[in-house]
Structures are given as C-alpha cells and as structure tokens.
C-alpha cells in the first residue's frame, strides 16, 4: 500500500472515531463546582493562546448554566429579582493585574469590599475590574443573575471576538457569600484562525509532519541497506529497525491526532492514550537498545546472559513510569497551561532515566576494556564514537532540562506560549539524532554476520584491519573482527561457554 494512502487512511480513521470522544478545545463543564478563593467563589473556564483575527478567532459561550443549592434558593421569594450574581471574566494574561485589588496595601481581593469601594470606586459585591491600557473594553465581564428562588440561571449564548494575539484566561466568579455550593454546566468554544488547536499545540502539528518525513527518509535508507545485506543481518540490527519503525509510527500518529483535533474540535481519550502508549514503547525499546549495545550485545557477546531478566525488568518498569507521565501530560489536556504532571509521576521517570544513564556508561566502560584487551582496534573506535555521542546527548539533555526549568519558572502565566512547543520538540529531535548515530555505526554490511562476535585476542591486528577493509570496500562499515579460529581456517566457535561465562562475570 502506498505510504501516503496509508497515512491518509489513518487520519480519516482518527477523525471518524474522534467524533464520539471527549471534547478538546471545546471546553465542557459538567456540574463543575466553584472553589472558595479569598472573598470569592471561583471556577476556571480554561486558558489558551489565541492568534488574533477579525472573524475566525473567538471564545463562544454555549448553554452555560449555573446551579445553586436549594438552601440558597430558599433564602429568596419568587417575586424578587437579581437574587444572586455570577460574572464571567475574560482577560489577556498581560492584563491580569487589572482584575482584583487591595485596600491600603492589604491582602489582594478579587471582589469589591467596602474599603475598596471607597478607594477605587468599584461596586461592592462585584469583581474588581479596571480597563486595560490598550483597550478600554477589556477585560470583558459578562454578568448573569439568578431571579426569584430559581435553582438555575443561564448565561446568554454569545461570542467574544479576539483581535489581539495573546494568552487568554476565562474565570467564572461569584462574590455573593450566599451562593456557596455553586456549580456550572455547559461549554465554551475556543477557536484559532486555522482550527481548534490551542496556540501552544498548533506549531507541533507542522513539526510532526517534518519529523514523519525525516523518519521516512531514514527508514528508506536503512531498509535499502537492510535488503542489500539481508543475509548478514545481526539481531541488534533488527532491534534498530524496530526503533526506526516505532519512531515513524509515533510521529505519524501524533500528526493524525492533532489534525483531527484541529478540524473537529474534539480529542478522544482512547485515541490519545493509544498514541501515548506507542510513544512509551518507542522510548522504552530505544533505551534498552542503547543499554544492550553498551553491554556489547551483538559485538563482543552473543547474549546478555544472566542480565537479560534484569534488563527486561527495568524495561517494564520504565514503560509504566513513562506511560503514566505521558498520560498525565497529554490525555485530556485541553488548556495551554494544563497538563503539568504531578511530582510523584515526574520523579520515578527522572530516577529511572538517571539509573539508565549510570548503567549505560558503566557497561560502556567495561566493553571498552574488553575491546582494548582483545586489541580490536576498529570496533574500539566505533565504541569510542558511540560513547562520545552518548556523552554529548547527556550533556545536551542536562542543559536543556536547566533551560526548561528556567523557561517555566520565568513564565508562570504562559505568556511565551508561542515558543513553548520547542520544549517538546527538542526531545524528539535529540532522540532522532542519537538514533542516526546508532544507524551509522551499526549499519548492515556484507561483513555483519562474519564478524558478529569477538573471539580471543589475535596477535596480528593488521589481519583484522585487512578483513574489515575488505568489508568496507563497497562503502559499508565493518563492525567486529574475525575470531582467531576463523582466521586460522579452523571451525569457528564464537559462542563458547568459557567466553560467555567470562563476559557475564565482567558485566
């Protein structure tokens, strides 16, 4: 099947399945409770980056209904009017200081108090709102009143057009102490000029197209070499193939998920969970592949021996930690400032990554010692290049984590939302670059199987160089040297029990 047709079919399938899912940038509220904050009852309606447009960018209110308790309703008669006020406040992050105030330098209040009414001229019982310096009509305040002893009050369906690019926040606020226990239902629709994707996510859709294309190019090159030397393929190269395929699948699925979200305004939990799971599998297999290569699997030892069960246990643990973290970060994320995983999900993933790095470099050190002892100069050079690439990636990761912490600490209100997508994109780019290094160093060649595992040290290092040079005459990279028995014309036995046992002890 043509790849383009396959990708299109996947996207169409996502779109069909997505129409019955949980709503995404269309924020849905199902009897959400108000929380007491200071002297107000408050409910967050969402926060998203919106690009300015005269017609196509807006926040629309649809069937917003407020519900008060029966006890609160019974405090009023059926003939009264305006027996409770709720206000919807829409403001741009830069204007956040225009909401609320303090009297005589005291505690900041959202609602107008008697003292604030004297000093600022606000109306007691309402939200304090000062006009923006750039637009007197902002922040926007939409009032809704309960009448008589009715249990519910409905906000008029209306649309607020966004004419200034920024991070917009919506809050529903009540300053009436009698409305304790207030809840709300309905939905709001947040629209950017090009679709329903929140502003922070929109650049990622283009990014995933780019990543899918470069993964496609990598898998085409790798598959050409793979088919060219399919008789010489080693197990480690099969695992590399799997990682490339998982990377292409993950990037394509993320693009399809974002494309569906952008077009129909819904983000199904089931499909997002599936995409997150594919990503967690890719990350787990990638790390186990690097760990196995660091242990010398496929180069200086035929198996991982007694370490196999430990490696698999680490893989399973890492998968569940990563799946939980990515699930919290992505599934159900409909705001540009939501999806911040809890600390108890971040810590296990960080600890396992640190443990993996320590184990990888410890194993690399031992593998390098083995290759030096056996005077395998060509393979030693390959492993030194691999070690340098890993060291650079670890340094880059630590530096980027520091930048990420700085970025989030200095932008608590997500005002730099237009560049926030780079935080996510960096990790995918780094993983791809490291994968390219692995593909280059362990590319299939005509000598892959012939030099699958090291035997005992040989006396003539020149013989190894000549054999590997012969394997690279067609532009291929030779990966391991001929064992001593094969070079002497005898029967080769690279899997001898003595050698494997010694390697396991060293590991």
Image: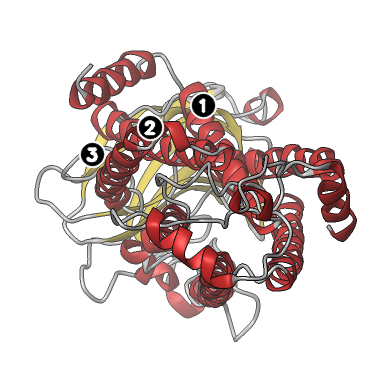
- Residue 154 in view (yes/no): no
Reading the chain from its start, which is encountered first: label 1 or label 3? 3
The residue depicted at 57 percent of the width and 47 percent of the height is 286
**96 left or right of 190 in image:** right
**213 left or right of 90 in image:** left
- Position of the C terminus, as image quadrant, is bottom right
The residue sitting at the left extreme is 54
For mark 3, give the secondary structure. Answer: strand
Q: Which residue is mark 2?
A: 253
User: Dot 2 surroundings within 10 Å: few (below 14), some, or many (20 or more)?
Assistant: many
User: Dot 3 surroundings within 10 Å: few (below 14), some, or many (20 or more)?
Assistant: some
Residue 77 is tagged as: none
Reading the chain from its start, which is encountered first: label 2 or label 1? 2
Residue 241 appears in which quarter of the rendering? Answer: top left
Closer to viewer: mark 1 or mark 3: 1
Tell me the CA gap for discs 3 and 2. Answer: 33 Å
Marks 1 and 3 close (CB-CB < 8 Å): no
**352 left or right of 45 in image:** right
The residue sitting at the bottom extreme is 105
Q: Which residue is mark 3?
A: 159
The residue depicted at 30 percent of the width and 69 percent of the height is 131
* Closest to the observer, 178 or 324: 324
Tell me the CA gap for discs 1 and 3. Answer: 34 Å
Tell me the CA gap for discs 2 and 1. Answer: 9 Å
- Please tell me whether residue 496 is drawn above or below residue 471 in the rendered image: above
Reading the chain from its start, which is encountered first: label 3 or label 2? 3
For mark 1, give the secondary structure. Answer: helix
């Amino acid at each position: 099947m043509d790849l383009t047709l396959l990708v299109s079919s996947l996207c169409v399938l996502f779109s069909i399945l997505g129409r019955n899912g949980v709503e995404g940038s269309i924020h849905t509220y199902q009897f959400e409770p108000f929380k007491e904050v200071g002297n107000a009852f408050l409910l967050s309606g969402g926060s998203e980056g919106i690009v300015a447009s005269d017609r196509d960018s807006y926040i629309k209110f649809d069937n917003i209904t407020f519900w008060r308790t029966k006890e609160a309703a019974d405090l009023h008669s059926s003939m009264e009017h305006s027996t409770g006020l709720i206000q919807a406040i829409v403001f741009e992050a830069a204007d956040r200081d225009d909401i609320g105030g303090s009297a005589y330098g005291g505690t900041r209040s959202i609602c107008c108090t008697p003292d604030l009414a004297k000093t600022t001229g606000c109306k007691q019982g309402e939200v304090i709102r000062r006009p923006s310096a750039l637009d007197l009509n902002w922040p926007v305040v939409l009032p809704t009143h309960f009448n008589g002893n009715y249990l519910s009050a409905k906000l008029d369906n209306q649309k607020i057009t966004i004419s200034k690019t920024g991070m917009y926040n919506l809050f529903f606020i009540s300053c009436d102490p009698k409305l304790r226990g207030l809840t709300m239902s309905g939905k709001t629709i947040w629209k950017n000029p090009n679709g329903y994707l929140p502003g922070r996510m929109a650049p990622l859709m283009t990014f995933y197209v780019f990543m899918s294309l470069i993964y496609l190019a990598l898998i085409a090159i790798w598959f050409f070499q793979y088919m060219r030397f399919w008789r010489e393929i080693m197990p480690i190269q099969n695992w590399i193939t799997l990682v490339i395929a998982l990377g292409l699948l993950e990037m394509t699925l993320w693009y399809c998920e974002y494309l569906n979200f952008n077009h129909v305004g819904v983000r199904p939990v089931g499909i997002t969970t599936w995409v997150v799971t594919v990503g967690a599998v890719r990350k787990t297999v990638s790390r186990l592949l690097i760990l196995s290569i660091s242990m010398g699997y496929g180069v200086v030892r035929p198996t991982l021996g007694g370490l196999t069960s430990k490696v698999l246990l680490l893989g399973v643990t890492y998968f569940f930690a990563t799946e939980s973290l990515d699930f919290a970060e992505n599934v159900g994320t409909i705001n540009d400032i939501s999806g911040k995983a809890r600390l108890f999900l971040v810590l296990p993933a960080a600890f396992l990554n640190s443990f993996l790095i320590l184990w990888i470099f410890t194993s690399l050190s031992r593998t390098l010692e083995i290759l030096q002892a056996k005077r395998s100069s060509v393979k030693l050079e390959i492993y030194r290049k691999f070690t340098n690439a890993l060291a650079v990636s670890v340094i880059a990761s630590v530096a980027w984590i520091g930048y990420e912490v700085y970025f989030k600490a200095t932008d608590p209100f997500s005002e730099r939302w237009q560049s926030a997508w780079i935080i996510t994109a960096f990790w995918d780019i780094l993983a791809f670059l490291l994968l390219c290094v692995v593909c280059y160093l362990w590319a299939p060649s005509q000598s892959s199987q012939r030099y699958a595992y090291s035997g005992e040290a040989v006396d003539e290092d020149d013989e190894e160089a000549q054999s590997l040079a012969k394997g690279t005459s067609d532009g291929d990279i030779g990966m391991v040297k001929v064992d001593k028995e094969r070079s002497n014309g005898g029967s080769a036995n690279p899997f001898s029990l003595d050698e494997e046992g010694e390697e396991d002890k060293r590991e």
